[in-house]
Amino acid sequence: AQSVSQHNHHVILSEAASLELGCNYSYGGTVNLFWYVQYPGQHLQLLLKYFSGDPLVKGIKGFEAEFIKSKFSFNLRKPSVQWSDTAEYFCAVPSSGGSYIPTFGRGTSLIVHP
Amino acid sequence: NAGVTQTPKFRVLKTGQSMTLLCAQDMNHEYMYWYRQDPGMGLRLIHYSVGEGTTAKGEVPDGYNVSRLKKQNFLLGLESAAPSQTSVYFCASSRQGGFYEQYFGPGTRLTVT
């Protein structure tokens, strides 16, 4: 079965610092890859997604992610974080089962100090 | 276009009571999901549906039942609530399975005392 690992569970940064959150998945077939963000007290919303083509994907609010097929990774990056980026970040991929139900990582809690 | 809506937003139950959470989507999506979110546990899939009239168990189905009688609605039932079911519940929908973006509802915060 597909699994998703997010290695950083809690990240604390100061404003203007660079961010990289790791995401690794186990299934080597065709994958669509997603990052979702959950701001405090809110529901999850899509940050960015990779379906095919350019492995460097740009999302909302200056976020980007790079799909590296050989490493089964889809790391999220932002060159300069802001206080408003404080949130929980989830990586997701389709499962390898017949229904291709989304499989989520455990999430990374990001706190940005002003 | 409301997207995904959930009712109620908050609820407090006593142990043993029952309740139903309603999820509705207006995007004509085939797939619908119920998740629970607990601190440090991420999102855990309770049940899901791949189309009207179908339901399937997810990762943590015990103590919950679901129904999808209409394509736009997905109901989550707790027959006999337990304190361990205190959580935030999110409904989501997607056009098909995990190859498509999921759209989430605002959540229901449930406390069982």
Image (cartoon, rainbow, N blue to C red):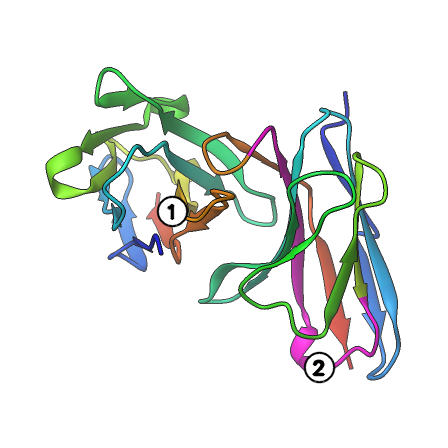
Q: Image quarter for residue A43?
A: top right
Q: With respect to residue B77, does B50 lie above or below?
A: above
**Left or right: residue B1 compared with residue B105:** right
The structure residue drawn at horizontal position 67% and vertical position 57%, both measured from the top left corner, is B89
Q: Residue at x 82, y 79 (%)?
A: B80
Residue A8 found in image quarter:
bottom left
* Percent of width and height locating residue B60: 58, 68
Q: Nearer the viewer, mark 1 or mark 2?
A: 1
For image coordinates 47% across by 45% down, the residue present is A98
Q: Amino acid at mark 1?
A: Ser
Residue B70 is situated, as x and y percent measured from the top left of the image, at 85, 38
Q: Is residue A46 above or below residue B79?
A: above
Vertical order, B68 against B62 (above or below): above
Viewer-proximal residue among A112 and B43: B43
Q: Do the numbered discs 1 and 2 sit on residues whose CB atoms are within 8 Å? A: no
Task: Say which residue label 2 marks.
Answer: B83
Q: Is residue B30 left or right of residue A80?
A: right
- Give me the disc on residue A96: 1
Question: Which residue shows up at 77% across the image and 27% down it?
Answer: B26
Work out whether disc 1 and disc 2 sit on a shared chain. no
Secondary-structure class at tag 1: loop
B92 part of magenta stretch: yes
What is the chain identity of the residue bearing mark 1? Answer: A
Image quadrant containing the C terminus of chain B: bottom right
**Disc 2: host chain:** B
Task: Report the magenta residues as a range.
Answer: B78-96
**Residue A68 lies within the magenta run:** no
Q: Nearer the viewer, residue B74 or A86?
A: B74
